[in-house]
Image: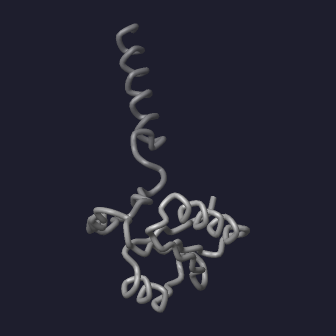
């Protein structure tokens, strides 16, 4: 009797599990993509070679137009001129924002300059 009752309980439990759907997914599986995506390989660009001396060179100080930076770069030019009198320091303001291209300025720097300091802002 006890054995029959135990067997009946086990069969009842198994039937309840099978009929209730436990053990199988109730919702369909979804595919999740990596939010980082697949970024392209980065092409490394080497830094420009250092110039051996500032003597007799022209160095451009480029202001991108960030708020109140032109006065700072003008004062920086004056300070650098006093410390390196044999070097010509030129302050230029780039058109647009940091992300905008300024081909005319880059051409001027390539033609007349030996180096550049680019002031980004804060």
Measured as percent of width and height from the top left, residue 43 is found at 26, 68
The quarter of the picture where the C terminus appears is bottom right
Q: How is the image coloured?
A: one colour
Q: Nearer the viewer, residue 58 or 2?
A: 58
Measured as percent of width and height from the top left, residue 44 is found at 26, 65
Measured as percent of width and height from the top left, residue 100 is found at 53, 82
Q: Quadrant of residue 17?
A: top left
Q: Quadrant of residue 42?
A: bottom left
- Whether residue 74 sits left or right of residue 109 in the image: it is right
* Position of 107 relative to 5 (above/below): below
Residue shown at 41% from the left, 60% from the top: 36
From this viewpoint, is residue 41 visible?
Answer: no
Measured as percent of width and height from the top left, residue 2 is found at 40, 7
* Residue lying farthest to the top in this orientation: 2
The quarter of the picture where the N terminus appears is top left
From this viewpoint, is residue 8 visible?
Answer: yes
* Position of 108 relative to 36 (above/below): below
Residue shown at 34% from the left, 66% from the top: 39
Q: Nearer the viewer, residue 114 or 23?
A: 114
Q: Nearer the viewer, residue 52 or 41?
A: 52
Residue shown at 28% from the left, 62% from the top: 52
Q: Quadrant of residue 41?
A: bottom left
Residue shown at 48% from the left, 41% from the top: 20
Task: Count how many numbered circles sit on residues in the image.
Answer: 0
- Whether residue 6 sits left or right of residue 70 in the image: it is left
């Amino acid at each position: 009797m006890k054995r029959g009752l135990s067997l009946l309980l086990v069969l009842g439990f198994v039937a309840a599990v099978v009929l209730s759907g436990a053990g199988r997914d109730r919702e369909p599986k979804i595919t999740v993509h990596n939010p980082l995506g697949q970024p392209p390989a980065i092409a490394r660009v080497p830094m420009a070679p250092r110039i051996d001396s500032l003597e007799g060179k022209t160095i451009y100080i480029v202001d991108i137009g960030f708020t109140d930076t032109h006065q700072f770069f003008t004062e920086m030019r004056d300070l650098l001129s006093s410390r390196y009198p044999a070097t010509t320091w030129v302050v230029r303001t780039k058109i647009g924002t940091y992300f905008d291209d300024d081909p005319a300025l880059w051409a001027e720097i390539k033609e007349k300059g030996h180096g550049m300091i680019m002031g980004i802002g804060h």
